[in-house]
Amino acid sequence: MVTFTRVLCPVDFSDTSAHAVRYASQIATWFKAQLTVQHVYLPLTVEVPGMPAVVESIPDAELERLMSETLTFAARTGGGSPGPTVVIDSGRPADAIVARAARDSADLVVIGTHGAGGFRHLVLGSVTEKVLRQVACPVLTVPPHVREAGGGTPFQRIVCAVDFSECSLAALDMAAALAETCQAHLRVVHAIEWPWHEPPAPAFDELPQAQADALREYRRYASDRATAALSAVIATVVGDRCEARGEVVHGKPHVQLLDTARTMNADLIALGVHGRSAFDVALFGSTTNQVVRQATCPVLTVRR
């Protein structure tokens, strides 16, 4: 089973932040965790190339105002009972969030996203994107217009993407633990992306016989191998902790994952995030970016 003891929820007083606070509050209540609501004060400074950034202290009057506004916001949006801890930090938002998560030993960060518009330029410095790539603990992103978190268990239907990498297996382990704790159903999805766009599959009768036979055999071999590998992973990582079903799908991973989530009306998508290097920005942009940007339910990203 999994438990969260310290949940961090950064807010900027937007509607998106309100959704995040509601989810963070529900999770904190379910797991009996301490919820910390954070607002980051960004000083108006002019940075000089080659010089360290100047982070000014927060004026007393401004600090008092922000504390009051953050407390009111948290209470109004569902994080007021039991009352969360409120902190005001100063500096670049992403850096301050990552630092606060490390300082408080947070085991979950819950943060809102602004959907397609706000997430379109991830590699150009989105706060959420930086947090996802840099924070050590799992991150739950909450999209706009997500259906409200209901009472009872936070999650009932979880979809987890597995590509057999170390980080995806870590995500599966976390998803299984959550499913066990919340008595949720778990769908484990592996996508095979072919050189052609599908579905639909290629029309074999339009190909030369030898090519069609070879392609048919390769497709069967790849599908059977992936199915066997997925079954083995579920048996090893998930075991008997929860009800889990594996599914091998065909097409672009983010498209198939989002389609599966919509079809089963999932209330959580879990997937692994690779590394922290600059090279990883490209990897992040391919699947995780698309899933976080387009999902209509919260997305849990896990790093190994």
Image (cartoon, helix red, strand yellow):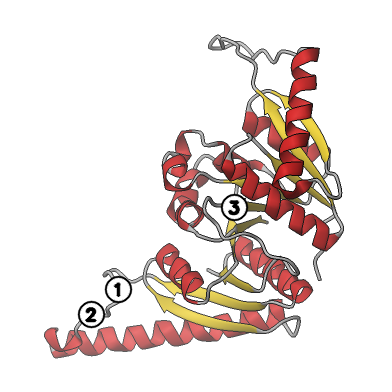
Whether residue 263 is visible, yes or no, is yes
Q: Where residue 28 sits in the image (x, y, percent)?
A: 80, 55
Alpha-carbon neighbours of circle 1 within 10 Å: few (<14), some, or many (≥20)? few
- Identify the residue under disc 1: 198
Of discs 3 and 2, which sits in the foreground?
3
Relative vertical location of residue 265 with respect to residue 210 in this rendering, above or below = above
Side of 286 where 113 appears, left or right: right
Relative vertical location of residue 211 with respect to residue 259 in this rendering, above or below = below
Which label is found at residue 202? 2
Residue that appears at 53% across and 50% down: 144
- Identify the residue under disc 3: 142
Q: What element carries label 2?
A: loop
Q: Where residue 38 sits in the image (x, y, percent)?
A: 74, 36
Residue that appears at 33% across and 71% down: 194
Q: Quadrant of residue 86?
A: top right
Using the numbered discs, state the Cα–Cα distance from disc 2 to disc 1 in whole angstroms: 8 Å
Asked whether disc 2 touches disc 1, contact meaning CB atoms under 8 Å apart, the reply is yes
Using the numbered discs, state the Cα–Cα distance from disc 3 to disc 2 in whole angstroms: 37 Å
Tell me the amino acid under the disc marked 1: Glu
Relative vertical location of residue 95 with respect to residue 173 in this rendering, above or below = above
Taking the view exactly as shown, the residue that stands out farthest to the front is 76
Residue nearest the viewer, comparing 33 with 171: 33
Q: Is mark 1 on a helix, strand or loop?
A: loop
